[in-house]
């Protein structure tokens, strides 16, 4: 099996790191070598968070280079746009249809771009997930990462039961049920 390159991007507090851990553990549980790396930036203040997960027979380094990501999972539209150049030509972009204004937009120093999804579709194969909306409907906005992961899981391989097993062992015990529901909602949407 060739090495699979995954990039997960979002804003601090969206569950980027937890999602990457679930991807990595699922690959590891299926017998693959896994390497992970993370960049936090100003995550605690709503800044960009980027993680890389690479898995395959033998993986030498954790960082995904520009233009080689097989799958880019984005929890926010602007983050999807900001990191879309990491996708390879036939890669897939899973993007949560949500807007979180960065500080520069909040203070009026810049403008949030319009038509991000439409612009991304011109260059990439994208799957849009209403993760925030689904999580809200489930009664817990914090599980949007599980919704989006559910949608992405179909493009990452592994059986649904493998994902569920890893999710149950990785999320906080008191949130297992709601995260599983969120994952299955995302998994069933695509």
Image: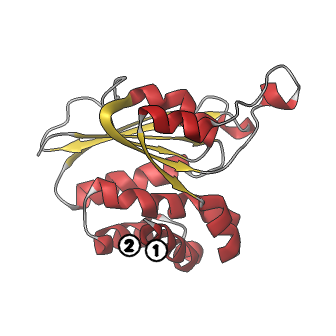
As rendered, which of 6 and 19 lies closer to the eye? 6
Viewer-proximal residue among 71 and 10: 71
Between 44 and 55, the one lying in front of the other is 55
* Quadrant of residue 80 within the rendered picture: top right
Residue farthest along the right direction in this orientation: 107
Determine whether the residue tagged by mark 1 lies in a helix, strand or loop: helix
In the image, residue 155 above or below residue 33: below
Check disc 2: other Cα within 10 Å, few if <14, some if 14-19, many if 20+.
many
Q: Identify the disc placed on residue 184.
A: 1
Mark 2 residue element: helix
Please state the horizontal and vertical placement of residue 159, each as a whole percent of the image: 26, 69
Is the residue under label 1 in contact with that under label 2 (CB below 8 Å)? Answer: yes
Taking the image as shown, residue 132 lies to the left or right of residue 146, namely: right
Q: Is residue 183 visible?
A: yes
Indicate which disc, 2 or 1, sits on the residue closer to the N terminus. Answer: 2
Q: In percent of the image, x 54 and y 80: which residue is there?
A: 177
Rendered-image quadrant of the C terminus: bottom left
- The image shows residue 181 at horizontal and vertical percentages of 52, 77
* Figure colour scheme: secondary structure
Question: Residue 27: x, y in percent?
Answer: 26, 55
The residue shown at (63%, 35%) is 78
Q: Residue furthest bottom?
A: 177
Image vertical order of residue 185 relative to residue 157, above or below: below
Q: Disc 2 marks which residue? A: 164
Q: Residue at x 36, y 67 (%)?
A: 166
Residue 49 visible here: no
Vertical relation: 72 (above or below) 153: above
> Which residue does the image show at 74% across and 31% down from the upper left?
112
């Amino acid at each position: 099996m060739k090495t699979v390159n995954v990039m997960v991007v979002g804003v601090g507090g969206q569950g980027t790191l937890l999602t990457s851990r679930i991807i990595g553990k699922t690959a590891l549980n299926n017998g693959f070598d896994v390497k992970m790396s993370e960049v936090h930036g100003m995550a605690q203040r709503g800044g960009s968070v980027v993680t890389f997960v690479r898995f395959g027979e033998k993986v030498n380094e954790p960082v995904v280079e520009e233009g080689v990501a097989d799958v880019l999972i984005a929890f926010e539209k602007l983050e999807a746009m900001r990191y879309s150049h990491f996708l390879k030509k036939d890669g897939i972009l899973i993007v949560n249809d949500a807007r979180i204004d960065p500080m520069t937009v909040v203070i009026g120093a810049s403008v949030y771009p319009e038509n991000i999804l439409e612009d991304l579709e011109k260059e990439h194969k994208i799957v849009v997930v209403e993760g925030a909306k689904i999580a809200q409907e489930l009664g817990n906005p914090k599980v949007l990462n599980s919704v989006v992961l559910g949608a992405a899981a179909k493009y990452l391989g592994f059986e649904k039961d493998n994902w569920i097993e890893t999710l149950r062992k990785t999320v906080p015990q008191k949130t297992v049920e709601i995260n599983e529901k969120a994952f299955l909602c995302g998994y069933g949407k695509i």
